[in-house]
Image (cartoon, rainbow, N blue to C red):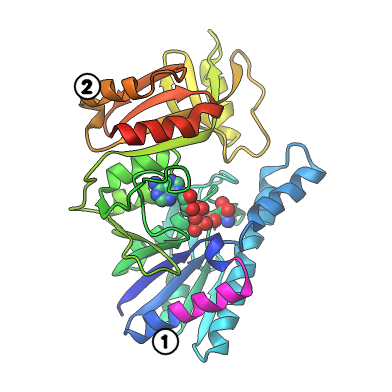
Amino acid sequence: MRIVVQKYGGSSVADLDRIRAVAARIAATRDSGRSVVAVVSAMGNTTNELLSLAHAVSAKPDRRELDMLLSVGERITMALLALALRERGVPAVSLTGSQSGIITDEAHADARVVEVRPSRILQVVAAGQVAIIAGFQGVSRDREVTTLGRGGSDTTAVVLAAALAADWCEICSDVDGVWSADPRVVGEAEKLEGLSLGEALALARGGAKVLYEDAVRYARDHGVAITASATFGPGAGSRIGAGAALGRVAVTGDTGLRRVRLGDRARQADVAALTAAGGRVRRSVGTTLYVDVRNAHGGMPPFEASTDEGPTSMVSAVRSALGEDAVATASATVALHGIAIRASGAEGDVAWWEVAPEDLDEAVRRLHAAF
Ligand code: ADP
Ligand code: ASP
Ligand code: MG
């Protein structure tokens, strides 16, 4: 069985016409002789709408109940897409994350995949049917529904590609691949032919939401090659995996950060509280932590000794070993002249500068022009 895993993001399945078009795309892949396992996101803005409902009834929604709610979004899409395929005469069966055997840890709203048991998917595929999988969700060992963090349908696709030994994993969205910067922010951004998984991880961790961090990390650790492409476009997309490397510096900005000043005591307890609340420490410089709070949903936890200094932003430049290239980082600093830089650093594939949220897009444009 030669299997292809395709993941369709929220904008690709935003309405029924697009769901039908995705069904046609899947049918075309199937006609070319491969079995298709399709992972779907929630339709359009559904996840945000579900989150708003939760926040309307609860200031700090319980994370278990949030998962029960948010996991519904992708389940709507999976059933509609299976119906659309059947309507075309293509046999298709939809499966939830739990039915797909995606086992996670217990961290509600920010769970990590710990095991994949794809027997149910393999049965569907062996019967000649298309398997449609609800992305972004799994089940913990004590049978609780969990979700994988915002953007986590990418993770579902990659873990399934590994477990099914798929020929490739195609992440389909509204943009043709990975670009040298967010094409919505930088008009001169260029499509990247290819990049390494390490470079892609640095970009994802820096806020480039075209690929989710956990998905890229899993792909790197399990040797999964990814193609990122536009669902409804002629472009060839970008190849992310062994043998590919950035031909230029890529730039990314991240707005979803908060700066936390660690107090003298109870540091471990405060960091543990941050993590339990869904915060991810992105960088730490001395006693300052930069924390991604996208999956926190209830704001910051109460600290014993630390201080939440509020929202902040970071612009990052990425290319293999860029952090060791003093000339590159120095010229970037010149390009950012006039923008207040609160802190900066460089390490491995990335150099970064902390800027005020209102300066972020301009910083991304200037940095991109400098490289
Ligand atoms: P999906 O819903 O299909 O998962 P996302 O919205 O999560 O899609 O990711 C696609 C978006 O990522 C694009 O619309 C684009 O604005 C943004 N983006 C940010 N940085 C980049 C980049 N370097 N290359 C391509 N897209 C990027
Ligand atoms: N629907 C989820 C989100 O909006 C997961 C995903 O789209 O990947 O974050
Ligand atoms: Mg996404």
Asked where in the image residue 6 lies, by quadrant, the reply is bottom left
Residue nearest the observer in this picture, 349 or 189: 189
Residue 44, position as x, y percentages in the image: 61, 60
Q: Is residue 56 left or right of residue 295?
A: right
| Residue under the point 56% across and 60% down | 10
Residue labelled with disc 2: 326
* Residue 180 position (above or below residue 50): above
2 vs 1, front mark: 2
Quick one: which residue is furthest to the top in this view?
Answer: 264
User: Which amino acid type corresponds to the residue marked 1 in the rendered image?
Assistant: Gly
* Residue 133 position (above or below residue 183): below
Residue 283, position as x, y percentages in the image: 42, 26
Residue labelled with disc 1: 128
Residue 232, position as x, y percentages in the image: 45, 69
Q: Is residue 189 left or right of residue 149?
A: left
Instruction: Give the extent of the magenta segment.
Output: 14-25
| Residue under the point 68% across and 49% down | 66
Tag 2–tag 1 contact (CB < 8 Å): no
Secondary structure category for the residue under label 1 = loop
Q: CA distance from mark 2 to mark 1?
A: 55 Å
* Residue 81 position (above or below residue 361): below
Q: Is residue 138 covered in magenta? A: no
Asked where in the image residue 158 lies, by quadrant, the reply is bottom left
